[in-house]
Amino acid sequence: MQLSLLPLLLLVALSPPATSHYSSSSSTSSPSSSSVSEWRPARATYYAATNPRDEVGGACGYGDLVKSGYGMATVGLSETLFERGQICGACFELRCVDDLRWCIPGTSIIVTATNFCAPNYGFEPDGGGHCNPPNKHFVLPIEAFGKIAIWKAGNMPVQYRRINCRREGSIRFTVDGGGIFISVLITNVAGSGDITAVKIKGSRTGWLPMGRNWGQNWHINADLKNQALSFEVTASDKSTVTAYNVAPRNWDYGQTFEGKQFETP
């Protein structure tokens, strides 16, 4: 099993953490039926971080997962699920099934997609190539895996479903770059969690579409210095929020600002 940590990292300043959590299937805070998809079969393995740097990076660009608020309630996805990074920020509920020896009954976990599990074509999909297509595979931190199964279990059958993300606080925009190149990392997104389109507006410009650089890093070539910045963010469920004057006109690279949040039922 290989967990890909994308070599390109944008080192940015992040705000204090938001809340991301584990939950029990019997919890009163479980998602409502209107915010979830049907259960689907998959498999799950885990990794144990042996170095603090193992919790930093990933193919979604969130950097330090603890500082950005995701903690250990995260997951790396196989190629079939990762959707070239489009899925970054989406939330899943997982539960262990079909194994009375290793599953912890009546439990589930809620995790956020933050990383990519790269295929290993030296092995067959039904052998050591857990993340090879067409497998639907989740790679969890051992802390999360241990909430639904005994860690000795290894490669376990699970069921998963998409759910709405619940976040404390607002969407965060971390601005980086230099000159006329602006890169914005977008985190702490509620609702569907994954973003399909972003627009930026200076106080002296109209709305300008941004392109996805990688993960949830969006970029544009535009001279927006000394202008207040507004953002329009569209999620995969087609909902859109517009946050006006998120960054003041004296913003600088490396700063993080908060804007309007998606509503969740």
Image: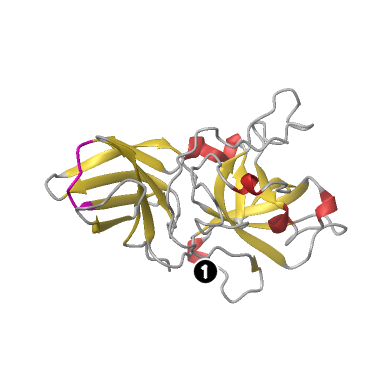
Q: Quadrant of residue 103?
A: bottom right
Colour scheme of the rendered structure: secondary structure
In the foreground, 121 or 96: 121
Query: Is 62 left or right of 222, judged from the image as shown?
Result: right
- At label 1, counting other C-alpha atoms closer than 10 Å, the crowd grade (few under 14, some 14-19, many 20 or more) is few
In the displayed structure, would residue 262 be above or below residue 197? below
The front one of 113 and 264 is: 113
In the displayed structure, would residue 168 be above or below residue 43? below
- Please say whether residue 225 is visible from this viewpoint: yes
Residue 116 within the segment the image draws in magenta: no
Residue found at x 23% / y 51%: 229
The answer to whether 82 appears left or right of 15 in the picture is right
First to last magenta residue range = 222-229
Identity of the residue drawn at 17% across and 49% down = 227
Instruction: Kindly state the secondary structure of the residue where label 1 is placed.
Output: loop
The quadrant in which the N terminus is found is top right
Disc 1 target residue? 32
Residue 70: x %, y % from top left: 55, 57
The outermost residue toward the left is: 204
Q: At x 25% / y 40%, what residue is drawn?
A: 209
| Position of residue 78 measured from the top left corner of the image (x, y, whole percent) | 62, 38
Chief SS of the magenta region:
loop
Q: Split into 4 quadrants, where in the image is the C terminus?
A: bottom left
Residue type beneath disc 1? Ser
**Residue 37 can be seen, yes or no:** no
> In the rendered view, would you say 59 is above or below 144?
above
